[in-house]
Image (cartoon, rainbow, N blue to C red):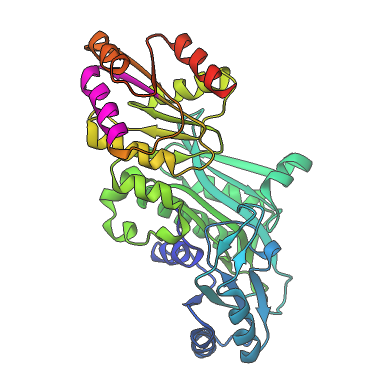
Amino acid sequence: MNLHEYQGKELLSSFGVRIQRGIVAKNAKEAVDAAKQLTVETGTAWYVVKAQVHAGGRGKGGGVKLAKNLQEVEDIAGQIIGMNLVTPQTSKEGKKVHQVLIAEDVYYPGDNEPEEYYMSVLLNRSTGKNMIMYSTEGGMDIEQVAEETPHLIFTEEIDPTLGILPFQARRVAFNLGLSGTAFKEMTKFVTALYTAYVKSDASLFEINPVLKTSDDKIMAVDSKVTLDDNALYRHRDLAQLRDLREENPIEVEAGSLGLNYVDLDGNVGCMVNGAGLAMATMDLIKQAGGEPANFLDVGGTADAARVEAAFKIILKDPNVKAILINIFGGIVRCDRVAQGVIDAYKNMGNITVPIIVRLQGTNADIAKDLIDNSGLDVLSATEFQEAADKVQEVLS
């Protein structure tokens, strides 16, 4: 589950991470009120107006702008709220902006020049350890930094059973070239950031940029936070931060029906029980010359109602030219699934794309007879290769 910038900053702040303070506004008037409040609380005279959408690169799309007075706050907020913001991380249609964050100006003059760094915390799956990735090149796309100047990217791997150790936090600060007050501030920042990552069961914390202000304070100017969906039962308060407007509506609907669904860009819809079999089925489709249109795991209770719900979800995608149902009958009987397919087909009555059904396992022979004798335009298969051949046939 992704969080908005302002939500991520609030989460960071609760663990002692210094943040760029800001107030969310849903319209231009609220934006002006937020700016006035920020001036009272922080003394800031300039303001940063930031679109709140689940996408990076907002500045490149015109979603982050500096306002030097209240009138500019009102004008800029009015322009950004309601716009479809297109960034390198959105579709060509972009994402509609429903709210903005009015943030304090933290690039104030002082004894030193402000400096920007990149920092993220994530799991290194190859080692099974958490990892802090950081760079002196903050404010830039980390992919570009990795490609052009890989020597400027550092990593610090942390044993999850031990947690971050003091020498590791100090090494991060040292590699960033810090000293004095800024060095001490960075060690505190890194330790608190890692604690927030672990305690909130996150899968990603990305701060770009981490700012060293002109008076050597270290703070998060931005935040990208992704929480582990499987751990949200332990964080009821965080689960309530979910913004369904930012998610794929088909995936949201599928989730409400208890289906594990991920929307893809292909032309063959998949309906499978079990994540491993679903991945293998997607490979099968590609080998047959098609492209999977989705990942859909109906689970172990593929009855008629569940199959019908899955059909409806798949057919919401206009790019689907065929549907492959691949079920292994272990817990669930294949004949039960076959009857569910038949009942769903009859109930819906408007399925115009070809359907290939492969059922293996308990009562697979009975299931095949049911499909073959149903009188419906459904093709049955027994082996993987046979299913692949039929997919290729209907697509050609």
Q: Residue at x 53, y 60 (%)?
A: 223
Camera-nearest residue between 157 and 384: 384
Camera-nearest residue between 379 and 301: 379
Q: Point out residue 148 in the picture as x, y percentages from the top left corner.
A: 78, 42
Q: Point out residue 355 in the picture as x, y percentages from the top left corner.
A: 42, 25
For the C terminus, give its image quadrant: top right
In the image: residue 366, left or right of residue 60: left
Q: Residue at x 31, y 50 (%)?
A: 232
Query: Could you say which quadrant of the image residue 346 lies in?
Result: top left
Q: Is residue 162 in sight in this rendering? A: no
Q: Point out residue 273 in the picture as x, y percentages from the top left corner.
A: 32, 26
Q: Point out residue 17 in the picture as x, y percentages from the top left corner.
A: 47, 63
The question of residue 205 being in magenta is answered with no
The question of residue 336 being in magenta is answered with yes
Q: Is residue 286 above or below residue 208?
A: above
Q: Is residue 314 in sight in this rendering? A: yes
Q: Which residues are magenta?
A: 325-346
Q: Is residue 244 above or below residue 142?
A: below
Q: How many marks?
A: 0
Q: Residue at x 44, y 11 (%)?
A: 384
Camera-nearest residue between 123 and 29: 29
Judged from this view, the residue extending furthest toward the front is 375
